[in-house]
Image (tube, grey):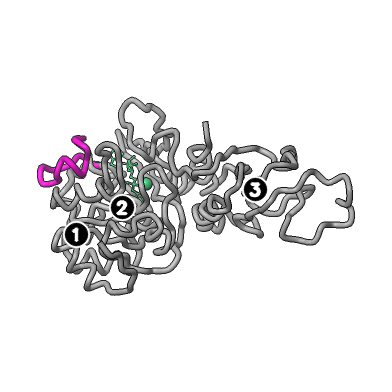
């Protein structure tokens, strides 16, 4: 199958109507979309991604009204969250209705739902006027795509169309929550941070791994092929001279030599062995910008044939918590 990258939304709607897969941009990462109410179309998602088993997918709504058709919404807190954050990068887990195929929810009684704010995604899902199942458009266990080219790198030859909407805004996947007795349980951290959720109810980190074993919650995920370790402080890591090591950190670190810059005079002889390459998630230390750059830079480093990637944890505040969460899962055990 030939994979086309274009901006043709109508072609996307047409393909989706016929039960085909389309790569679509959302405000978080690119999704691999299929008609959520067509089991065979959804099965193609698992095939294209090579997911080793069926894991629950997020269903994206054409409009707020469509929610009642697929889910049972009882919680007032959930209503308030939707009012505040939809359309946007918040996924909410509800009890599902019969109409949602089991393959979408991996047999669970719940369904994860969101409404994308991306103009291209919205246009396509509205014109189709059916909910779309869409996981991140990467092969199983790999880095989530934030550009159309990334999707092509992952899935070329397996899907007919990728709609190009440029680089995605947030760069990491949506926050996933479930509301239980007015309590907001966070299943996956993301652009809607704990701080943003707190005005709506007590926020709890969902920790029990027994309830669900889906990729987003697997300890290893979003992983580059290159070995990756996470450190608290890059300064304390001395790359062995004979190894090609890449560094990923928020911003320039005092005392760490950037191979891309002229060597500072003070670092003449006693500098720690240099990293082969460095990536700064945000030179001005902006965590939102860091999130938007995160998967792309991970991909770039992965393409450089390094022996090791060393990533420095970012401040655990705001969306930084979600970045650190992805880092933990990208790390080699
Ligand atoms: O930002 C996003 O959410 C992107 C864009 C494309 O919308 N999608 C995404 O989908 O990240 P995916 O399949 O890569 O991750 C979906 C995660 C799964 O890992 C699973 O943990 C969780 O959603 N999930 C789905 N349904 C669930 C359910 N009923 N209960 C608990 N978790 C669920
Ligand atoms: Mg994913």
Does 247 sit left or right of 38 as displayed? Answer: right
Location of ligand 1 given as a quarter of the image: top left
Does 202 sit left or right of 213 as displayed? Answer: right
Mark 3 and mark 1 in contact? Answer it, CB < 8 Å. no
Which percent across, then down, holds residue 176?
Answer: 36, 44
Residue for badge 2: 82
Residue for badge 1: 20
Q: Nearer the viewer, mark 3 or mark 2?
A: 3
Mark 2 and mark 1: span between their CA atoms?
A: 29 Å
Q: Quadrant of residue 55?
A: top left
Q: Quadrant of the N terminus?
A: bottom left
Residue 69 visible somewhere in the drawing: no
Does 256 sit left or right of 281 as displayed? Answer: right
Q: Indicate which disc, 3 or 2, sits on the residue closer to the N terminus.
A: 2
Asked if the magenta segment contains residue 105, the reply would be yes
Q: Indicate which disc, 3 or 1, sits on the residue closer to the N terminus.
A: 1
Residue for badge 3: 247
Which percent across, then down, holds residue 138?
Answer: 37, 51
Mark 3 and mark 2: span between their CA atoms?
A: 39 Å
């Amino acid at each position: 199958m030939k994979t086309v990258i274009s901006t043709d939304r109508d072609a996307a709607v047409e393909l989706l109507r016929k039960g085909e897969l389309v790569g679509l941009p959302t405000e978080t990462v690119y999704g691999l979309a299929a008609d959520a109410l067509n089991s065979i179309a959804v099965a193609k998602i698992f095939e294209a991604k090579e997911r080793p088993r069926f894991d629950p997918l997020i269903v994206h709504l054409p409009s707020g009204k469509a929610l009642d058709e697929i889910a049972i919404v009882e919680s007032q807190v959930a209503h308030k969250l939707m009012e505040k954050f939809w359309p946007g990068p918040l996924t909410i887990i509800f009890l599902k209705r019969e109409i949602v195929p089991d393959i979408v929810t991996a047999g669970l009684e719940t369904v994860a739902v969101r409404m994308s704010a991306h103009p291209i995604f919205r246009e396509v899902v509205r014109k189709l006027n059916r909910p779309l199942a869409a996981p991140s458009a990467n092969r199983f266990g790999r880095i989530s795509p934030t550009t159309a080219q990334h999707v092509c790198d992952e899935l070329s030859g397996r899907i007919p169309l990728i709609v190009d909407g440029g680089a995605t805004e947030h760069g990491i996947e949506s926050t996933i929550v479930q509301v239980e007795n007015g309590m907001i349980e966070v299943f996956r951290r993301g652009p809607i941070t704990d701080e943003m959720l707190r005005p709506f109810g007590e926020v709890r980190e969902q920790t029990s791994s027994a309830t669900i074993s889906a990729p987003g919650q697997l300890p290893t995920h979003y992983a580059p092929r290159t070995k990756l370790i996470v450190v608290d402080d890059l300064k304390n890591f001395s790359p062995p001279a004979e190894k090609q090591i890449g560094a990923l950190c928020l911003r320039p670190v005092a005392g760490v030599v950037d191979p891309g810059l002229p060597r500072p005079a003070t670092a003449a002889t006693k500098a720690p062995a240099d990293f082969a390459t460095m990536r700064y998630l945000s030179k001005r230390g902006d965590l939102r910008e860091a999130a938007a750059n995160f998967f792309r830079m991970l991909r770039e480093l992965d393409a450089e044939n390094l022996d090791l990637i060393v990533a420095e944890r970012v401040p655990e505040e705001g969306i930084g918590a979600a970045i650190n969460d992805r880092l933990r899962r990208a790390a080699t055990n």
